């Protein structure tokens, strides 16, 4: 178990380094000098001297390796630089936006599990019945609907039928829990729709496989209630592949978070990232890429480790 | 079911079609009768391809009714009906024509992105699986790095670095999609490698390139097609999401995702057709690819997992 842990950890760090190098290099190496872009582009009025001055200020004239080194060092210290657009600290930006994004992601993940798992189990247990077919149809349908369209439709229906519109300002969870939850529940549900469909399908096929196993037959032969057979014996084993895909699910949810933040005006990391891209705010973009890379790689590592703990067979793979 | 296939094959035989045509028709009719949902998916995809292809040529409109870019200030925000089958947007542009031309754009972006990305994954997967060693290790690590990011965020980051533009979007999408294909094909290659004919080819001294190209590649086409068809749906979704966020296909190309920004959101209450139709188009096309991909997997994958 420890060998597996150490291997995963080392690999995670290597991946993180690789990802940051890639991000850093791509941003620096591609055509379109950062300094020129910031001063209004090639057609701007900035003279060569001003561009040079900015380049020196931003440290762009030093060799690439040195730049990368300084950047990583400052990242590790927690200094993410200042936004090129607003001048404020990027660290502050991340801290202020993070709670909303995390909350949305966690709520969406929870909803998708709460909706998807029971649906998958039900469809597997009642295979080939009307319930099965309608649940499968629902899953396939929701996998094809673009999340942002669903969000727009929900808002549209909300506005026309219920006279409701997305809130203009958001409270954090500790400021006003009631208001916060009522604001966040809709975007979380919409995000969950896509993932719950995928989880439902996976749970269904996984359960179907498990239900054919011999130990299930034994459990039934012992005379156990069907519900016990399903829930206590089948479900545990069926959940293993679902767990492996948790990091993937979380990733998809994080991806969808961006879109939903835009539609529902949530001031989260997604909108910060978009604004950074739109306004060519390279410090913000870089910092957020680094931050996201760390988060995802850590989550992947955690899920891999948990998977190794759950299923001893793969520790020796 | 057997009767329909027989009938189709006989019809061809009586007209003098060769054995290949008969075999493909037989496979096709069997597919349609065994997997009606897959056939529905194929039909949806085919419908959109036809619509995109025959939207119009140059100035002439065939399936579209108007110029998708032509603004008509006098006909702004008109509801569906009359000359504008699906209404007009805030600039007076015909929604129906924009959807029709948008099909062309979305399909082209998706086909190019998947064509490049999945093919790259195919080639690299075969190389990685067959050669093993440090090549395999390197490619595996690379694809794991890319796969550790969610598709949307990765695509956004790519666009942030590469800049806007149609070609950049295609490149970004290819990079997002090739690792999955690489993984799947690599797995297939590993099992194909166990076969005796590979050993035989090696024994008579075939070069590695020859073995990879002539023996391994044709035998991994089945998983390749499955991955490609499923990824096409994801590509359409990802492209429309990027366009929705303003970082996808740039104007003037009409894009379904971008049709849902701006005016669509502003005037959503008074002009719901602006929101409903482009989104429905995306949903139908993705649904088509998903249904077809699922059916293809059920048919081609010998290890059927309890349906």
Image (cartoon, coloured by chain):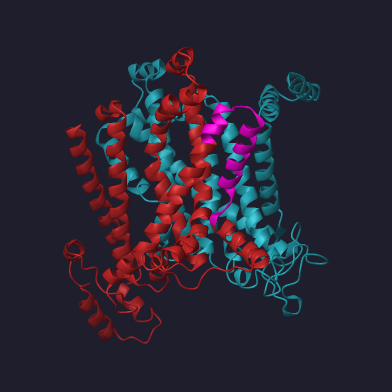
Judged left or right of residue B59, residue A144 is: left
On screen, A94 above or below A2? below
Residue at horizontal 21%, vertical 68%? Answer: A79
The reply to whether the magenta stretch includes residue A138 is yes
Give A214 or B122, whichever is nearer the viewer. Answer: A214
Give B175 or A274, whichever is nearer the viewer. Answer: A274
Q: Residue furthest right?
A: B82
The reply to whether the magenta stretch includes residue B210 is no
Question: The C terminus of chain A appears in which quarter of the rendering?
Answer: top left
Tell me where residue B87 appears, x and y as whole percent: 74, 66
Tell me where residue B58 appears, x and y as whole percent: 69, 63
Residue B227 in view in this figure: no
Residue B12 in view in this figure: yes
Quarter of the view holding residue B266: bottom right
Residue at horizontal 67%, vertical 49%? Answer: B48
Residue at horizontal 35%, vertical 62%? Answer: A99
Give B195 or B151, whichever is nearer the viewer. Answer: B151
Judged left or right of residue B237, residue A12 is: left
Residue at horizontal 70%, vertical 64%? Answer: B273
Tell me where residue B134 appears, x and y as whole percent: 24, 36
In this picture, which residue range is highlighted in magenta? A120-147
Question: The N terminus of chain A appears in which quarter of the rendering?
Answer: top left
The picture's colour for chain A is: red
Number of callouts: 0
The picture's colour for chain B is: cyan
Magenta segment, prevailing SS (helix, strand or loop): helix
């Amino acid at each position: 178990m420890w060998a597996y842990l150490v291997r995963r950890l080392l690999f995670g760090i290597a991946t993180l380094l690789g990802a940051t190098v890639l991000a850093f290099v791509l941003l620096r190496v591609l055509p379109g000098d950062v300094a020129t872009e910031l001063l209004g582009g090639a057609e701007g009025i900035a003279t060569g001297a001003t561009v040079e001055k900015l380049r020196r200020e931003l440290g762009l004239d030093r060799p690439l390796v040195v730049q990368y080194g300084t950047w990583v060092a400052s990242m590790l210290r927690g200094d993410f630089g200042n936004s090129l657009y607003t001048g404020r600290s990027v660290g502050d930006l991340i801290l202020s936006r993070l709670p909303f994004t995390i909350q949305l992601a966690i709520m969406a993940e929870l909803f998708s599990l709460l909706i998807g798992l029971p649906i998958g189990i039900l469809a597997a247990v009642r295979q080939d019945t009307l319930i099965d077919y309608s649940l499968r149809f629902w899953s396939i349908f929701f996998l094809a609907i673009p999340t942002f369209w669903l969000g727009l439709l929900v808002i549209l229906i909300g506005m026309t039928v219920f006279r409701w519109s997305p809130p203009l300002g958001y409270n954090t969870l500790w400021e006003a829990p009631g208001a916060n939850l009522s604001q966040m529940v809709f975007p979380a549900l919409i995000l969950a729709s896509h993932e719950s469909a995928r989880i439902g399908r996976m749970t269904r096929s996984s359960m179907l496989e498990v239900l054919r196993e011999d130990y299930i037959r034994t459990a039934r032969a012992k005379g156990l209630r069907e519900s016990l057979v399903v829930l206590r014996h089948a479900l545990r084993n069926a959940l293993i592949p679902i767990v492996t895909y948790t990091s993937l699910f979380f990733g998809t949810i994080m991806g969808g978070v961006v879109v939903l933040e835009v539609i529902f005006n949530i001031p989260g990391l997604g909108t910060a990232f978009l604004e950074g891209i739109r306004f060519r705010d390279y410090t913000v973009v870089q910092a957020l890429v680094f931050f996201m890379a760390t988060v995802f790689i850590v989550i992947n590592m955690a899920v891999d480790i948990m998977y190794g703990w759950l299923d001893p067979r793969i520790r020796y793979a | 079911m057997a009767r329909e296939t027989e009938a189709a094959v006989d019809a061809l035989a009586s007209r003098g079609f060769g054995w290949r045509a008969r075999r493909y028709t037989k496979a096709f009719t069997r597919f349609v009768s065994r997997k009606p949902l897959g056939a529905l998916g194929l039909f949806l995809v085919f419908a959109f391809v036809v619509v995109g292809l025959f939207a119009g040529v140059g100035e002439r409109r065939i399936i579209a009714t108007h110029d998708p870019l032509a603004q008509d200030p006098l006909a702004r925000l008109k509801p569906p009906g009359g000359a504008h089958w699906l209404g007009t947007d805030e600039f007076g542009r015909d929604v129906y024509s924009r959807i029709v031309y948008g099909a062309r754009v979305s399909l082209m972006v998706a086909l190019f992105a998947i064509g490049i990305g999945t093919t790259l994954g195919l080639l690299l997967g075969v190389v990685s699986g067959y050669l093993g060693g440090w090549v395999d290790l390197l490619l595996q690590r690379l694809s794991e790095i890319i796969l550790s990011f969610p598709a949307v965020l990765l695509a956004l980051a790519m666009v942030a670095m590469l800049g806007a533009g149609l070609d950049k979007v295609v490149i970004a999408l290819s990079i997002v999609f090739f690792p999955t294909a690489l993984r799947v094909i690599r797995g297939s290659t590993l099992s194909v490698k166990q076969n005796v004919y590979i050993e035989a080819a090696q024994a008579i001294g075939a070069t590695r390139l020859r073995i990879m190209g002539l023996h391994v590649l044709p035998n991994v086409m089945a998983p390749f097609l499955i991955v490609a068809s499923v990824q096409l749906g994801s590509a359409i979704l990802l492209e429309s999401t990027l366009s929705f966020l303003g970082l996808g296909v740039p104007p003037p190309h009409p894009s379904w995702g971008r049709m849902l920004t701006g005016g669509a959101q502003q005037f959503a209450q008074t002009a719901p057709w602006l929101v409903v139709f482009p989104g429905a188009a995306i949903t139908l096309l993705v649904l088509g690819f998903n249904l077809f991909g699922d059916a293809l997997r059920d048919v081609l994958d010998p290890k059927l997992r309890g349906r």
